[in-house]
Image: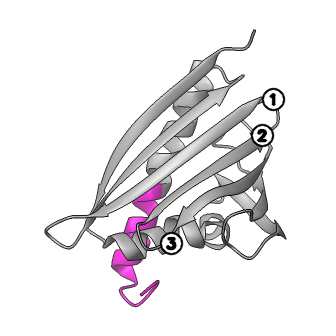
Amino acid sequence: MASTNSWTHELESKVSAPRMFRACVMDWHTLAPKLAPHVIDNAHHVEGDGGTGTVRHYNCGSAVPFNTMKKKVEFLDVDKFECKYTVECDGVETSTWNIKMKPTANGGSVANVECTSKGVQANDMLKVKESAAEMFKSVEAYLIANPNAYN
């Protein structure tokens, strides 16, 4: 029987929740290959309109332990900055991600990210967690440097 591994991460940002959500969730397929090609080499749309049910295919870079992944949006609430998606990767039975972003009093945001995967070794899950945190900080830096992006 394959083991189940999970992690949670709370990531703080100086950037507002709406901008971070649009960049990290809604336009991730476009932004990730530009900001971190070592994590996501390229991505393309498979089906859907960007909302619940949308499927995108990603070719992964050298920083993650997978070659490809297919991401399906299971739940999306743009107004509350929440989403849930499932990911299929080579060698992974199941992977579920929950992302919730909340505004902070200083105009920034906090993202709570939960990931549960079955069929992934613990050391590979650590690489995924580290890559997710790195990507979040890359997006934050991009948005700070480009104050008109994702407004």
Tell me the SS state at disc 3: helix
**Residue sitting at the far right:** 46
Q: Quadrant of residue 49?
A: bottom right
Q: Amino acid at mark 1?
A: Gly
Q: Which residue is mark 2?
A: 89
Residue 151, disc: none
Q: Position of residue 31 (x, y in %)?
A: 60, 71
Measuring 20% from the left and 64% from the top, which residue is drawn there? 104
Please tell me which residue lies in front, 38 or 47.
47
In the picture provided, is 32 more to the left or to the right than 106? right
- Residue 106 located within the stretch drawn in magenta: no
**Residue sitting at the far left:** 105
Q: Amino acid at mark 3?
A: Ala
Q: How dense is the environment of label 2, judged by Cα within 10 Å: few (below 14), some, or many (20 and up)?
A: many
Colour style of the rendered protein structure: one colour
Residue 23, disc: 3
Asked whether the viewer can see residue 109, the reply is yes
* Marks 1 and 2 close (CB-CB < 8 Å): yes
Q: Position of residue 61 (x, y in %)?
A: 71, 50
Measuring 39% from the left and 75% from the top, which residue is drawn there? 18
Q: Which residues are magenta?
A: 136-151
In the picture provided, is 122 more to the left or to the right than 50? left
Tell me: residue 123, above or below residue 52. Answer: above
Measuring 60% from the left and 58% from the top, which residue is drawn there? 75
Tell me the SS state at disc 1: loop
